[in-house]
Amino acid sequence: MKQMTLVLAIAAALMSGTATALVQPEEVFSWQELDFAWPSKEAEDEAVKNGEYIRENNLPLGIDAWKDKLFITVPRWKAGVASSLNYIDLRTANKSSPLTPYPSWEANKLPKQGQQPPENQIVSVFRSFVDTCDRLWVMETGLADILGSPHQVSPPAIVIFDLNTDKVLRRYLLKPEDIKGDDSFFANIVVDLQPGRCDEAFAYIPDLGGYGIVVYSFKDDDSWRIKHNFFHFDPLQGDMTVGGVNFQWTDGVFGIALGNPNENGDRTVYFHPLASTMEFSVNSHALKNRTLATDPHSYDLYKIEGTKGPNSQTSESTIDPKTEVMFFTQLQKDGTACWNVKTPLEPSNVGMVAEDTERMIFTNDITIDSDRNLWMLSDRMPEFIYRRLDPNQINYRIFKVPVDEAIRGTPCDPMYQQSTTLRNAQQL
Ligand SMILES: *[C@@H]1O[C@H](CO)[C@@H](O)[C@H](O)[C@H]1NC(C)=O
Ligand SMILES: *[C@@H]1O[C@H](CO)[C@@H](O)[C@H](O)[C@H]1NC(C)=O
């Protein structure tokens, strides 16, 4: 009887927690428009004069954290992007810090016609990935002025930097058969490796426009392309309204998140198309083994995890290895949600960890750093693409919250799961 009371008390305490599930993440950075750390005022003025820097056309999109560096990508959606791959030094940053090009200004300059680009050249990048071997993997699309007069400045490539030396370890050009003509759009990259086995890394690159996944083996320095029906968009989920802007997208496979590895080093690879409310998965051995990956009979190795509920379209997702909680952006809900992958994926197991109809419009990217902080970037991208951002308001923000605080009181919290089990046990 006494035990029962204790159980009840714990359950009640945890249940009352659900009312305050939404933590207020710290707003670390906010900008009306982006500034860059130019070598001099003259260099900036010169770039403005010759059209190399058009301030309002610089939209931050992807984030990644490594030690004191917070990487921020600025894709060349429009003309006048000063630099596509950048970082902020968190030790000296203020709230509206200018971005510093990575690894250098030179690497981020558009090459002149006929000029041989340097090995570290970055034309345009959407997202990057920091691995546990201190490497930054950059999916260089090579495509400039996407919304204006798009031109392929250099071929799509994976560029891998050693973060300790800032030198390029490798530049791998995607093969013609990896690319599906003009349809291909490579906006993401996720790296799968076991601790310490840096040479055995695989990169998974979703092709949101060509509905495929390109797998790259670091050891073999080779790539292959996979297709599956689950990589396509759901025609009923492409009509979205974000920040008052209505648009129709056909983006297929977009976000990829890695579960924890088993004893063979294989893991569940979770993925979703952007224009979809579903989550799917496949075991990594079906991607890493080229024979298996490209065999049509592998179709049934892909699984439906479940649905995240109405209006739950997601760009990026990522998993905290300690709790195995997946975080995923919620484009139409102005925030970020969570799901504990040990539970079935259904709306009742999904919790909102952050939500703000003004400050979190279009949560474009999220990442978890090595201290288990969840970082989120919101950038009002639909307004940037289809209308015009108001330079007098704050348009871009970056937030930070410890993972354990973010999930407290949500269905993703392992403590919440325990309390639910206790409650259920009691009802028996
Ligand atoms: C932030 O730091 C940059 C230099 O990194 C400086 O130019 C700028 O004035 C600072 N802003 C504020 C508000 O202190
Ligand atoms: C890859 O998959 C094929 C087909 O299932 C299998 O025969 C082969 O042994 C696998 N290779 C490795 C290295 O696991």
Image: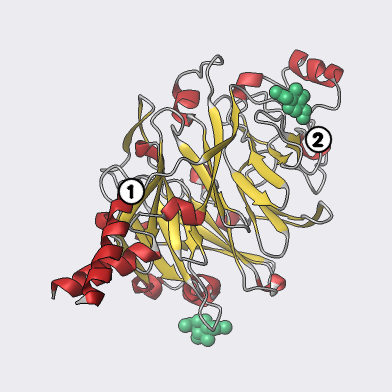
Numbered badge on residue 276: 1
Residue 32 in the image: state x and y as whole percent: 58, 22
Side (left or right) of 145 relative to 428 = right
**Would you call the spot at circle 1 few (<14 residues within 10 Å), some (14-19), or many (20 or more)?**
many
Q: How many labels does the image show?
A: 2
Give me the C-alpha separation between circle 2 and circle 1: 38 Å
**Can residue 303 be seen in this snapshot?**
yes
Quadrant for the N terminus, please.
bottom left
Residue 224 in the image: state x and y as whole percent: 56, 64
Query: What colouring method underlies this structural image?
Result: secondary structure
Side (left or right) of 32 relative to 218 = left
Q: Residue furthest front?
A: 2
Residue 203 in the image: state x and y as whole percent: 60, 62
Residue at 81% across, 39% down: 104
The amino acid beneath tag 1 is: Ser
Q: Identify whether 372 is placed above or below 331.
A: below
The amino acid beneath tag 2 is: Trp
**Would you call the spot at circle 2 few (<14 residues within 10 Å), some (14-19), or many (20 or more)?**
some
Occupied quadrant, residue 118? top right
Query: Circle 2 sits in a helix, a strand or a loop, which is it?
Result: loop
Q: Which of 108 and 66 is in front in this view?
A: 66
Residue 71 in the image: state x and y as whole percent: 67, 44
Determine whether the beta carbon of the residue marked 2 sits less than 8 angstroms from the nearest atom of ligand 1.
no
Q: Name the residue under label 2.
A: 105
Side (left or right) of 253 relative to 233 = right
The answer to whether mark 2 and mark 1 are in CB contact below 8 A is no
Residue at 32% across, 69% down: 418
Residue at 25% across, 45% down: 310
